[in-house]
Image (tube, helix red, strand yellow):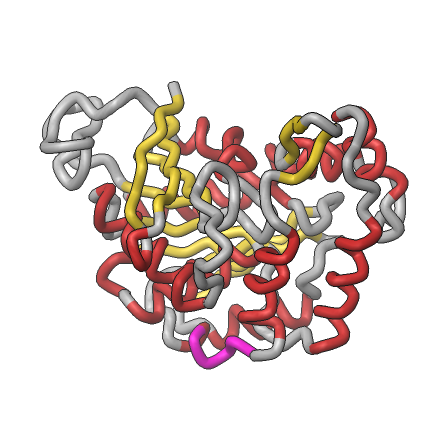
Amino acid sequence: MVRRIDVSGASGIRLAAWEFADPPKTGPGRGGAGAAGAGGGERTPGVLLLHGLMGRASHWASTARWLAERHRAVALDQRGHGQSAKPPETEYTRGAYVEDAEAALEELGLAPAVLIGHAMGALTAWQLAARRPDLVRGLVICDMRASALGAASQREWEEWFKSWPVPFATLADVRKWFGEDDPWVERTNTSRGEFYAEVMAEYEDGWRPVFEPEQMLKSREAWVYDAHWEELAQVRCPTLVVRGLDGELGRAESQEMVRVLPDGRYAEVVDAGHLVHYDQPEAWRAAVEPFLDEVLR
């Protein structure tokens, strides 16, 4: 069962959170701090899942389902994404994203929780862990760099968005373009096609993304020009850095991230690119689950 819970983020923006489990049987309100496990008395450990840029909470569905067997698993549609609000006047700063995640943890009664973040969501997770260590007991960073990417990277993304042949006539066209025809694809990648099909909606003229590309560029602009090593060094909780062998986070940088972290661990998933949890879901689980067992036991 998946149920939607609305959360008020920074400046009151409406955010959609998705809980992948039966509603808690005990506890006040919407199943907050008093949520109990199957035994009735013990509080179920909370896990908050944060997707990357252009992603949505449903991208975590397979991960959340196995997490929900033992933990309280909630995935958040971040501002400008999924079914959360996308007002044009909204700020897409790092601070706003971090405050949204902070509000979700507190309103849903998940803290102290483990945060699992992919790409931009991983950066949000470690910035929150540095800012509010009382809310975070563990952290999983999936394929996110701590180094500055620079202006050239942002220009590449601007040109990439312009290259999208929108609207797409069918979802099959979406899957084919992002899985095969996109110039950024080195070889056929069906999981990438599925990933982008998940963020499309049907309009009168065809299929278009559920997000505004301009808002995505604003969100990205908030981090690409800066390095984030200092904040990483401030994360005190146990942290697992996971990279796909063919992902965007290189081995040398990922291992330096582990060294900088006060309590860092490392995991590598072979035959996976940037979308580690989509490319190799079983190997992703095998990398993450032992860490969660240690942190949440």
Q: Please state the horizontal and vertical placement of residue 272, each as a whole percent of the image.
A: 72, 45
Quadrant of the frame with the C terminus: top left
Can residue 191 be spotted in the picture?
yes
Which residues are the magenta region?
227-231
Q: Residue furthest front?
A: 204
Pick the residue in front: 285 or 46. 46
Query: Is the magenta region chiefly helix, strand or loop?
Result: helix
In the depicted view, which residue is nearer to us: 284 or 161?
161
Closer to the camera, 91 or 230?
91
Query: x%, y% of residue 73?
Result: 36, 36
Q: How many marks?
A: 0
Residue 105 placement (x, y as % from top left): 28, 49
Q: Residue at x 52, y 33 (%)?
A: 58
Q: Which residue is depicted at the point 63% across and 30% down?
A: 201
Membership of 230 in magenta stretch: yes
Nearer-the-camera pick, 102 or 39: 102
Q: At 61% from the left edge and 49% from the top edge, which residue is drawn? A: 212
- Looking at the picture, does residue 161 appear above or below residue 67? below
| Image quadrant occupied by the N terminus | top left
Picture quadrant of residue 17: top left
Left or right relative to 214: residue 177: right
Hey, which quadrant is residue 256 in on the image? bottom right
Q: Is residue 206 magenta?
A: no
Q: Is residue 286 visible?
A: no
